[in-house]
Amino acid sequence: MFYRTSGQFKTSYTADMALFPVRQDAILLAVILAFAWVILPLTASEFAFQTLLIPILIYSLAAMGLNILTGYAGQLSLGTAAFMGVGAYACYKLVTIMPWMNPVVAILMSGVFSAGVGVAFGIPSLRIKGFYLAIATLAAQFFLVWLFEKWAWLYNYNASGAIQVPTLEMFGVTVAGPTASSHVQYYVVLGIVTLMTILCINLTRGTLGRTWKATRDMDIAAELIGINLMKSKLTAFAISSYIVGVAGALFVFMWRGAAEPNLFDIPLSFRILFIAIIGGLGSVLGNYLGAILIVGLPVILNTLPETFGLPISSATVEHLNIMIVGALIVFFLIIEPHGLARLWALIREKLVIWPFPH
Amino acid sequence: MKLWKKLAAATALTVIAGGAMAEGLYAPNMAYRTGPFAALGIPLMNGQADYMTMLNERDGGVGGVPVDFSECETGYSTEKGVECYEKTKGTAIVTQPWSTGITLQVLPKTNVDEIPILAPGYGFSPMSEGGTFQWAYNPPVSYWDGAYMIISHIAGGDMSTLKGKKIAFLHLDHPFGKEPLPLLEKMAEEHGFELVPVPVGLKEMQNQSAQWLQIRRERPDNVIMWGWGAMNSAAIQEAVKTRYPMDQFYGVWWAGHDPDLAAVGEEGKGYKSISWSMPQPDSSLMADIKKHVIDTGKTQTTEDQLNSVFYQRGLVMSMMLAEAIKAAQEHTGKADIGPKDLRWGFENLNITEEKLAELGMSGMVPPFSTSCSNHTGHSGAWILEWDGSQFTQASDLLQADQSVIKPLAEAKAAEYAEANAPWPVVECDS
C-alpha cells in the first residue's frame, strides 16, 4: 500500500538501470535530503550540531571508505584510523604551508596523500588474504601512529605534540577554527559527504564496483574471467583510503579542532569497522545507519535521564549507556547478521507486498 | 526514515533539556568515574563534590546561592569531553575540563563562548599568561613551576651542584607528559646537567621493562616522573624491581597517589612527589565535611579516602572555585553571577594565610594570588615523601624562579597566539 510498485513500468533500458527504479525510493530520498539540507539545520541546536549531526556524517564517510575496501573488494583492513590520521596531518601541513589555500580544496587534496599511503600498505594484499592481510594493515596502524608522534615536522614542532586547527576562511566566511559557526561547518561536511556518497554509489554500480565484487567473491574465478587482480585491489585501496583520508581531515578540521596522535589509534579503527559491520558490509546506506546507532545513540541516551528528570548520577548513566548500546549491537546482529542495511531491505520488501503477502 | 525522525526528536529534546537545567550557580565538573583513569579520578571528584555539598549544606551555597555541582561523565575521553562542553556551555559559569586533551580542545572555544576554564594544576603551562589566555586559569602552580621546583630540590637549592649530573625524565608520550620538556631542556643547558628523556607510550604504560632497562643502563642520578594513571603504579613497581634507589625518584603531583605507593609499602620508602596540596586530617574543614557531608550520607566518599592526598586536593580545587565565585559576587554586588563575572573572580583570587585559616584549611595549600598577567598564582609547593605507610611533608615550601619561567611562558604564549591567529590578546596592567 505504502510501497506499491505496480503500475510503474519501465519502457527503456535506461529507466530500468536508473538509480531509483521505484518511485517511492526516490521520494524517500528526497525527504531525507530535505531533512539533512533544510529542516535539521533550521531546527538543530548547537549541541545537536556538534555531538550528533556533524560527527555522524563524518563517521559515516569514514565507514563508507572502509566499506569500499572491506565490503565491496573483500580486503579486511584494521588501519582505517591511521589513514584518517594521514588525511588530517596532510591537511594540517597543507593549510599551514599554504595558508591562502581554499580549505575545502585542502581537505579534498589531503585525501590524495592518504590514498598514496593506502596503496603502499595495500601492496601486500596481492600476496596475502584474509586475516593475514588484517595483520598487515594493523602494521600500518602502529607504524603511522608512531610516525605522527615522532616526526615533529608533521605537527610543526609544537611543544605539546598535538595539532591545532588554525582559523580558515573561504570567500570571507570562517569555515574552520574556534570562531567558525556550526552551520557553516555542517554544510561543508554535508556537501563533501553528499559528493562522496554520489561518487561511491556510482562507482560501486559500474565496472570498477563489479570487478571489486568479483574479487571479493572469489579471486581465482575473477582472475580467470580476465580481471586484473592487482588493479582491482589497488584501486580499492586507493579509493577507500582517499575517502577515509578526507573523512580524517573533516574529523579534525570541521569537528574536533585539535588532535593528538593517539586519537588515530586502534580504538578509532575498530569503531569505524563496527559501524561498517553493523550497518552492513557492501552497502552505502548501511554506513549511515551504523553511524547513527554507534555514534548518535549513546549521545541521545546520555541526555535522556536529564530530560525526564531522573536523578541518576552521570557515571551510572555512562555505565547504563555502554550496556544498552552493547546489548543493541548484539540484538541487531542476531536478528540480521548482514547489518542494518539488510534489515531495511527486508522491511522494504515486506512493505512492497503488504498487505497481501504471498 | 524512522531513524531520521528519532534523530530529529532527540534534537528537539536536547533543546528543551538545555533550557531546563540549572538552579543556582551551575558549575559542572567533567568527571571521569569510568574508564582507564577512574581509580585516580574518583577520589579527586569526590573531594570536589564534597566541598560544594558542604557549602550548600552549611552556608546554603556561596553568597546565599546554592552551587549546582553536577558531573558530566567523560571517562577521560576527549570526544565525550567536547560533548559535555557543548551540553553545559549554555548555562554553566565555568568549564572544568579535567584532562590536557580536553583542555587543548576547549581552550580556543572558550574565547568565543566566553566561559572561564578552571584547570587547577594541569593544562598548558603558558596559560599563566593571562593577556593571551584570557579565559583560562591553572592555579596554583603550573607544570613548569613543578619541574623547576623538583630540579631545585634535587640541587638542594644550589643549582651549581647540578653540573655533570644525569637526570632521567620518565614521561607519558602525550601532550601532558611532554609539557615540562622545554623548561627542562633549557635548565639542562644552563646548569650543565644531562637530561635523558625516557618516553612511555600510551600503550606501554603498564609494561615499562624497556624503559627501566634503559634507566638501569644509563644510571641516572635522579629520575623525574611525569606520569598519570596506570603509568605511575607500573613505574613504581618497576623501580622497586630494578632496585632503583627510591630516594632519588621524584614524581609530579599526579604521581603521588596513596594506593600506588601502598602497593609496594616499605619498599617505596623515600619516593618523593611534589605537591601543591597537603592532607590536613585535623583541620576544621575536615570536621565540617565529616559533619555535614559524610555523616549525613550525601556523598560517594568512602572512609579510607578521606585523608588521602588526592581527596583533599579535590577539596582545595573546589575551594578555589568557591573563592572565585565569592570574589565575583563582592565585585559585582549580585549573588547570581555569570561566566564573565566569574572570570573577574578568577583573575582576582587572593588566597592569604588568614583566608585559609578562616576557611579551616591552613596548610592544605600555600597562599597565592592571581592577576591579569599571572593566571597561575605560582604558589609554590612542597615535597611529599612516602614513609612506608603514608605521604609526609619532606621540605619547606619551594618556589619556582619566575625569572626563568616567565620568558619561556611569554614566548610560548605568543607562539600559540600566532599559530591560532586571529587570537585576541590584551595588554595587562598588573
Image: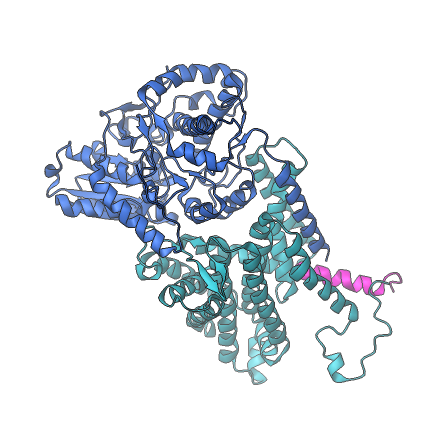
Chain colours: A cyan, B blue
Side of A343 relative to B51 (left or right): right
Would you identify the image quadrant in which residue A148 lies?
bottom left
The residue located at (62%, 79%) in the rendering is A206
Front residue of this view, candidates A218 and B375: B375
Considering only vertical position in the picture, is B364 above or below B183? above
Q: Is residue A257 visible?
A: yes
- Residue B76 within the segment the image draws in magenta: no
Is B366 on the left-hand or right-hand side of A332? left
> Which stretch did the figure color magenta?
A338-358
Image quarter hosting the N terminus of chain A:
bottom right
Q: Quadrant of residue B159?
A: top left
**B159 or A337, which is in the foreground?**
B159
- Which residue appears farthest toward the right when viewing the image? A356
Q: Main secondary structure of the magenta part?
A: helix
Please state which of residues A263 and B62 is positioned toward the viewer in this rendering.
Answer: B62
* Quarter of the image where the C terminus of chain A is located: bottom right
